[in-house]
Image (cartoon, coloured by chain):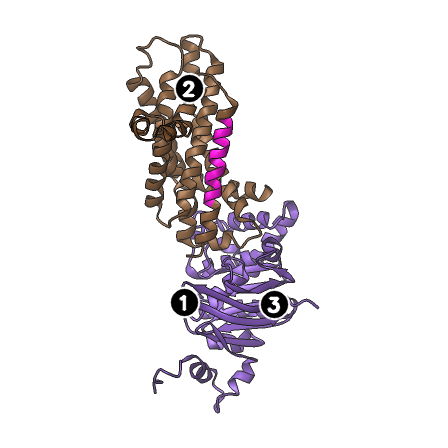
Amino acid sequence: MVALIEIAGLTKRFGSFTAVDDVSFRLDKGEVLGFLGPNGAGKTTTMRMLAGFVAPTAGTAAIAGHDVVAEPVAARRHLGFLPEGAPTYPEMTVLGFLRFVARIRGYAGAALARRVAEAVALTQLETVRLQTVETLSKGFKRRVGLAQALLHNPPVLVLDEPTDGLDPNQKHEVRTLIRRMAPDKAIVISTHLLEEVDAVCTRAIIIAAGRVVADDTPAGLAARDPKGRLEEVFRAITIPPSLPKAA
Amino acid sequence: MRQALIIARRELDGYFATPVAYVFIVIFLVLQGTLTFNAGDFFGRGQADLVPFFDFLPWVFLLLVPAISMRLWAEERRLGTIELLLTLPVTEGEAVIGKFLAAWAFCIIALVLTFPFVITVNILGSPDNGVIAAGYLGGVLVSGAFLAVGSATSAMTKNQVIAFVLGVAISFVFALSAYPVVTDFLDRNLPVLAEIARGFSVIERFQSFAQGLIRVPDLVFFASFIGFWLFVNAVVIDHSKAS
């Protein structure tokens, strides 16, 4: 079976700076991968390469068997992507924006209306669907971004910090939503909230300075610390040994 | 092409969702009207034609068209929506063409709204409406040429002001390249280039339309000019979209 996400030797250099260094993993249906790392570790750059927004310097990435560089449009059809900061067009209404995305995704008529209604219901946007995006709170904006990514029910979801800016209740809802969708999809979420990994992920990859430093189940990672605390494991792995560790 | 049209439609709706569209159209019509009637001495000439209108049109476009194109890409880059747009199942080419078409359609709407001039000359006399139609076609092409330049400069920066100034500056070079300022200098120093520069003059080519001449070389010129700058636009987007 073709892996839904397959990344091999993915590398990105900006001048002499290596943002992502030889990252490889594959993800099958039913897996939820938590992509962890300190700020600037290369999470966003990796996700951008996976979405075909940034061209890799070396290595390959494929979504549902379609190489993101050689067949970008085919790869993106199978992908729902929430970019960092959930950007949306501020002057558009929620409904107008989702309809635009649905049209681009090839829907029309009744199918379009159904898709948009489903995405609105899943992300609980009914109350604001006629408001322009610029008038929405951060949490609603994030959910509009999420609705856009889910709209075409893609087999692969790549979500860059999906719960950033949400209040605890909204976080809980988004996590419930991710768990509910998980069996049929391959999902990558980046986060620096370790509790999120425990809550939704079946697997966690920690990257630091562009390199994969751990790839395990959340339980397996936690087991590396005598007290089973993920936070301690994260610190031990991602703080460079040359730096003195804070007490 | 379908994708490009969907993008164009969104973009065009965006113009009318903000005051940009109304401000532009009003300023364009006021400026074009004032110049034609006052500076162009429309009534004093005693001729039922739109010569003064078309004399000023490219210069008004030179100033205002980059204001339409400046937001096309600079705004996407500033808001980060470029990451959303270019990770949807569209090619960069479709996005570039879609945005350009929206801005072009908008310029055409503004141009269509100058119809009272046509009605006026038809009431006052019997103008050659064929010449007027050719002039309008030329106007559409000139706006397209300046838009393509402005669209490319918009892709080069996140700052709309820089995009605007660069767009005006580059368009100005192509507007002026058949004028004595440029050609006299080149004639004296590089006669070969003077002839080439004359060939690239957007305004000189426009003037033959304003005289009622629709010539194939001029059509080819405008098509290539627009195509070239949209290509530059796509290259710039591909190179700098993530920075």
Q: Which residue is mark 1?
A: A17
Residue B55's x, y, as percent?
36, 21
Label 1 packing within 10 angstroms: few (<14), some (14-19), many (20+): few
Q: Main secondary structure of the magenta part?
A: helix
- A217 sits to left or right of B158: right
The reply to whether callout 3 and callout 1 are in contact (CB within 8 Å) is no
- A66 sits to left or right of B61: right
Q: Residue at x 46, y 49 (%)?
A: B237
Residue A2's x, y, as percent?
68, 66
- Amino acid type at circle 2 is Pro
- Please state which of the two labelled residues, at mark 3 or mark 2, is closer to the viewer: 3
Magenta-drawn stretch contains A59: no
- A91 sits to left or right of A33: left
- Stretch in magenta: B219-233
Q: Which residue is mark 2?
A: B116
- Amino acid type at circle 1 is Phe
Q: CA distance from mark 1 to mark 2?
A: 60 Å
> What shade does chain A have?
purple
Q: Which residue is mark 3?
A: A6
